Image (cartoon, rainbow, N blue to C red):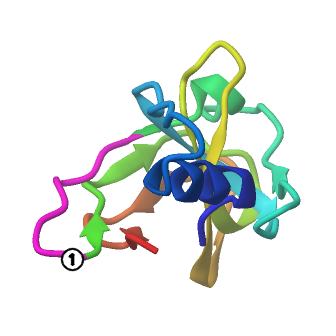
Amino acid sequence: MLDATYANMITNARLGTASFVAPVTPIHARLMVVNGTATVNGTELATSGGYTGSTGAPVISFASASGEQAVSNVAVTVPNMPACTIVGIELWDSSGSPRRLEVMPLTSSKTVNLGDTFNLAAGQVISNQT
């Protein structure tokens, strides 16, 4: 689901009431231990082990959208994880004051043990155009 502020920016730009400010790349996939909503940020995994948090969160990239299709990610790997349960991700840009773009609960939470590698397989993260 789109972040409400980001969704409003898209709508306002589409209707000509404001200019659109494009996200600054790279886009980061912040790992969440508590999911947020469209209006409230989730709780991000604390920096530990191979997860450096916030702007050091793993970079995620997507294929280009075409024909009003949803787009999916390329694989993302985070080695040397702390023991935790990941319930979702949030996509954030890399601007000076990073902006949240999307909230994405995982279809099933992923528990990792200390030292494990966390993987988001290619195609596991779907970004819709709405």
Q: Is residue 126 left or right of residue 115?
A: left
- Within 10 Å of disc 1 (Cα), the crowding (few <14, some 14-19, many 20+) is few
Task: Using the image as rendered, state which of residue 107 and residue 7 is in the foreground.
Answer: 7
Q: Which residue is mark 1?
A: 69
Q: Is residue 30 magenta?
A: no
Q: Is residue 48 left or right of residue 59?
A: right
Return the x and y of residue 42 as percentages of the image width and height: 83, 58
Task: Using the image as rendered, state which of residue 3 and residue 85 is in the foreground.
Answer: 3
Main SS of residues in magenta:
loop
> Magenta region: which residues?
60-69
Residue 59 sits in quarter: top left
- Identified by mark 1, the residue type is Gln
Q: Residue at x 36, y 73 (%)?
A: 124
Return the x and y of residue 37 as percentages of the image width and height: 80, 70
Residue 68 versus residue 60 in the image, above or below: below
Q: Residue at x 60, y 72 (%)?
A: 1
Q: Secondary structure at mark 1?
A: loop
Q: Is residue 100 left or right of residue 21?
A: right
